[in-house]
Image (tube, grey):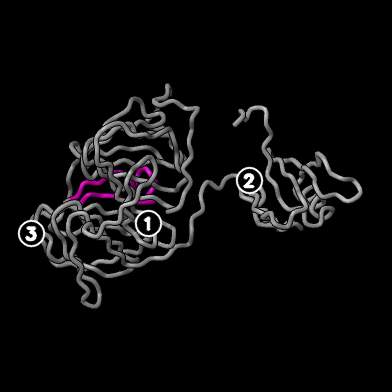
Amino acid sequence: MSKLNDQIAEIVLPCGEMDKTLTFFSNELGFQLESIYPADNPIDAVIYGFGLRIRLKKDDTISPGVITITGKTTGNLIAPNGTEIRFKHSGDSYFLPKGNQSLQISKLNEPKWKIGRAGMEYRNLISDRYGGRFIASHIRIQKAGPVPDYVHYHKIRFQMIYCYKGWGKVVYEDQGDPFTFTEGDCFLQPPEIRHRVLENSDQFEVIEITSPASHMTCTDPNLELPNSNIDPTQIFNGQTFIIHKAENANWEDWRNPGFIMRDIGIAEATHDLAQVQVVKSSGNKTSFTEKHETEFHFIFLLNGSMELLFQGNRNYNLGSGDSITIPSLTEFSIGQCPDGTQFLEILFA
């Protein structure tokens, strides 16, 4: 194959009724005509605009396709040749579905691992992804060594990563030299902060919570990390980067007796979008029932065991590595929960 430098790339679309199609692309969208052939009965025309070169060709077997134009306009149009024109606002970095809530349990002994980005293994912890509003992933890399990752960022509203087992080495935009995070550590990854995973230990595992579930991951090959600018207070789309080190954490009373917690600090960094804490069973417990008016309530059992009691005498037993989502305004209580049991809890406002 010859080198691509001296070639021109173009998208080929059906012309439909050539005159109407050209008028639409010119008057409605602002494309310019480059060439047309033949003049008396055109079957081929080239137009260009928005950095895009299109050849309109008389061939009904060609798909009409979809063109997305980013700018100040929103909405959809259909061209005379059938091409769908989708307008996207330039400020839209992600689409957040309306979503839905349901009680869902994921069991570690029923694994469904898939190979994802950069060779990492993923286990989906919420089967329907809350209607596309949230994704909770158990991610692992089983062998130690460098990670074939690259500088990238995510177009998201929220993302946090908790180190479940082992350790990983990562580097972040404006945060200085690479650092290692180990079991129990957690960090908030603000929207569109550039980062890269460098290496990991054997049996490295993390829990990652992201909203929305389907989001764009973009590369940034022009940025080398670590970069020269160092500013830990830098704001990325309204949030700041934080790393919570388990070894330095202070334990305090949880909202119910018989439990203590260490707060991750994500509420402050996200302006109360989400609360994240690690909770430990400890001491004398008293019976309680609670419910939360919340967009998202997720529990991942880090170790030990837990019995959750719900309305209608529904009981669910969780073991290490299991997780559950609790719908808004659903009454529940914690039954059997031996001392030392720990779980990760995420609550959205």
| Residue that extends furthest to the right in the rendered view of this protein | 40
Left or right of 119: which side holds 237?
Answer: right
**Residue 1 in the image, given as x and y percentages of width and height:** 59, 32
Residue 124, quarter of picture:
bottom left
Left or right of 178: which side holds 211?
Answer: right
| Residue that extends furthest to the front in the rendered view of this protein | 1
Magenta-span inclusion, residue 63: no
Tell me the tag on residue 70.
2
Residue type at mark 1: give it: Ala
Whether pointer 1 and pointer 3 mark residues with C-beta atoms closer than 8 Å, the reply is: no
**Residue 131 in the image, given as x and y percentages of width and height:** 43, 62
In this view, 112 is above or below 197: below
- Label 3: few (<14), some or many (≥20) within 10 Å? few
Residue 310, quarter of picture:
bottom left
Tell me the tag on residue 349.
1
Residue type at mark 2: give it: Thr
Residue 80, quarter of picture:
bottom right
Tell me the tag on residue 284.
3
Residue type at mark 3: give it: Asn
Q: What element carries label 3?
A: loop
Give the mark count. 3
Q: How far apart are marks 1 and 2 (CA)?
A: 31 Å
